[in-house]
Image (spheres, rainbow, N blue to C red):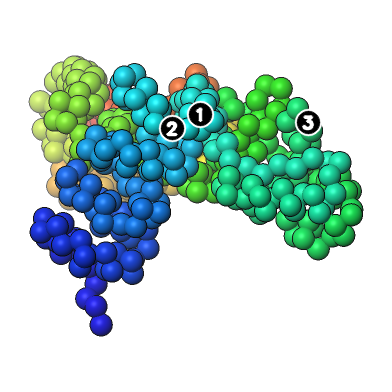
Amino acid sequence: MTEPLDFEDLRRRLREEARAELAPLLEGLQDQDVAALAAGLAPEEGVRLIRALAPERAPDVFSYLPLEQQRGLLEILNDDERTRILARVSFDDVAALLDGLPESETAALLALLPGDRRRLVRQLLSYPRESAGRRMTPGFLAVRPGWTLGQALDHLRSEYEQSETVNVVFVTDDAGHLLGTVRLRDLLVGSPRRRVDSLLQEEVISTRVDTDQEEAAWLIRHYDLEVLPVVDARDVLVGILTVDDVMDVVTEETTEDFLRMGSVGPIAPGLKDAALGLLYRKRVGWLIILVFVNLISGAVISLFERSIEAVVALVFFLPLVIATGGNAGSQASTLLVRSLATGEVQSRDWLRLLGKELLVSGALGLTLGGTVWLAAVWLAGPQVGLAVAVAMVLVVVLGSLVGLLLPLVLTRLRLDPATASAPLVTSISDVGGILLYFAVATAILAFGG
């Protein structure tokens, strides 16, 4: 039995150029598994791997490689190899590959494509970034309403290789306007002399080329679609989005949201391949902003110097109370941003969400306040215990409301709610929490004194 191929073994064989030994091992792996093994290879090693594959298989493995690695391989492959790969990779993958390259490189690679394929890729690149048009593939099957089922099936047999999926067949008029769909099963079992329009399902969910890719992905999830037709402003069918496209979109959008919530923002090449300067620029901006926000916290503390001098024990509990408020705010923000992203809640639900958050955060505050009250009474006496407990309740409620309302406000302003990141929510909660903590403590201690 042949031992499974691992990454180090693959690299060794590629360095030794033992292609005769490597080829049968690669044949036993799925295309995705070969690409996963190749993901960490240097460009020169990746080229040797591509050349070790059967010519008809190389484009399929190439399509599963990370984008930056694909570009690195194309720089080394010769024109014949590039042409063979780019002619077989799906249209949307070619568009993604060319997007962002210098114009000279884009033009050189486009020149390797056949005329019709070059025109379609140019069309995809003309649509806005992160739109359904940029993500779609123009490979689909369409029949005419006046055809017989026999004619339609003959057409599908001759054109099926041009389509990414054959399970859904679209019906268009002579000008390409989308009229509806027919099920492949109905075409197969119906009488060959029956007309296509007798099976036409006119109610079809579609989207426009300029629709945001995240909204298009939501349509596929919401309506449980296998394929989503994409039309232009004249309702002409120009492409389709499939489930695998949606999975890519969801992965990218989720990653982008997580990065924004960490006050970082999208990193195009990915963490492993990102330059040091890029990582620095992505992180330094928000950190500087948060430094200035936290300077306000110091200014607020200075306003209560007398209270601190009178009861030094207040300082002991300050980090505990403030951190808890920030943590509560981060929890609320994370829950809401994710719910907004999945469409579970809308900004119009703010009043209902506000009422629910007040009740939940109040209960959390009372629970945490009761817990910290015991410690504060034991360490600093009943007055300080009461001050810390009341402040804890109010700070937890405040932090939770900041975490809830900030994403909603950003959504109403048509900004990305993920910008309401944990560090930002925490910093805002800290300023308000410090003010509340010392104000409550000063009032209670003054009343008790």
Reading the image, the residue beneath label 1 is 115
Quarter of the N terminus within the rendering? bottom left
What crowding class fits label 1: few (fewer than 14 Cα within 10 Å), some (14-19), or many (20 or more)?
A: few
Residue at mark 1 to residue at mark 2: CA–CA distance: 6 Å
For the residue pair 218 and 41, the one nearer the viewer reads as 41
Residue 49 placed where, x, y %? Answer: 24, 53
Quarter location, residue 17: bottom left
Q: Secondary structure at mark 1?
A: helix
Amino acid carrying label 3: it is Asp
Quarter of the C terminus within the rendering? top left
Reading the image, the residue beneath label 3 is 174
Asked whether the viewer can see residue 448, the reply is no
| Image position of 117 (left or right of 234) | left
Residue at point 58%, 45% (across, down):
162
Q: Secondary structure at mark 2?
A: loop
Amino acid carrying label 2: it is Leu
For the residue pair 17 and 307, the one nearer the viewer reads as 17
Residue at point 33%, 60% (across, down):
33
Residue 310 placed where, x, y %? Answer: 12, 27
Reading the image, the residue beneath label 2 is 113
- Say which label, 1 or 3, has the lower sequence index: 1
